[in-house]
Image (cartoon, helix red, strand yellow):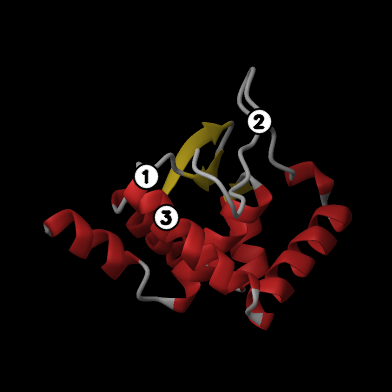
């Protein structure tokens, strides 16, 4: 029960929902991208991403001095929860605006575009079947 409470509580914040949606739909995002797109200060972005990571929603990797975040691998029951949540967020105007701001920001500053880890492609969460 504690795992369920921790995972669900982590989603009880609009910035965390938006960050999860962004990294799940974009595959991987640098912390600076998340800060810029969501309009967060570095400490706020880091705190929210840490909460999502501790709850098992996102995973991170270091690339130089930057941390890159992606949707974490989750088991079947939590995959269904995440998939349903992302489908709901896909219909939210704020989430759509975030994706558009992210695309525009990458075009303006490609120097911070996320690079996949060696031999890995970024993973995108999709609606539909199980992983």
For image coordinates 58% across by 53% down, the residue present is 23
Q: Which mark is residue 80?
A: 3
Query: Which residue is denoted by mark 2 in the rendering?
Result: 116
**Disc count in the image?**
3
Tell me residue 9's x, y (percent): 27, 69
Tell me residue 90's x, y (percent): 64, 70
Q: Are the two marked residues, 3 and 1, in contact with CB atoms closer than 8 angstroms?
A: yes
Is disc 1 placed on a helix, strand or loop? Answer: helix
The N terminus lies in quadrant: bottom left
Q: Which mark is residue 76?
A: 1
Q: For the residues carrying marks 2 and 1, which lies nearer the camera in this image?
A: 1
Residue located farthest toward the bottom when viewing the structure as drawn: 93
For image coordinates 53% across by 45% down, the residue present is 69
Query: Please, is residue 92 above or below residue 46 in the view?
Result: below
Say whether residue 13 is visible.
yes
Left or right: where does residue 71 sit relative to residue 117? left
For image coordinates 38% across by 61% down, the residue present is 47
Left or right: where does residue 12 sit relative to residue 15? left
- Alpha carbon of mark 3 to alpha carbon of mark 2: how far? 25 Å
Tell me residue 125's x, y (percent): 58, 49
- Alpha carbon of mark 3 to alpha carbon of mark 1: how far? 6 Å
Give whichever of 84, 58 is nearer the camera. 84
């Amino acid at each position: 029960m504690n795992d369920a409470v921790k995972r669900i509580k982590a989603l009880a914040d609009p910035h965390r929902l938006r960050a999860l949606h962004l990294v799940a739909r974009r595959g991987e995002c640098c912390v600076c991208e998340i800060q810029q797109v969501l309009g967060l200060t570095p400490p706020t972005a880091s705190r929210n991403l840490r909460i999502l990571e501790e709850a098992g929603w996102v995973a991170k990797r270091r690339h130089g001095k930057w941390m890159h975040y992606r949707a974490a691998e989750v088991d079947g029951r939590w995959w269904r929860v995440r998939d349903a949540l992302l489908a709901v967020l896909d219909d939210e105007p704020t989430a759509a605006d975030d994706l558009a701001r992210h695309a525009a920001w990458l075009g303006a500053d490609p120097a911070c575009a996320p690079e996949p880890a060696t031999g890995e492609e970024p993973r995108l969460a999709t609606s539909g079947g199980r992983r």
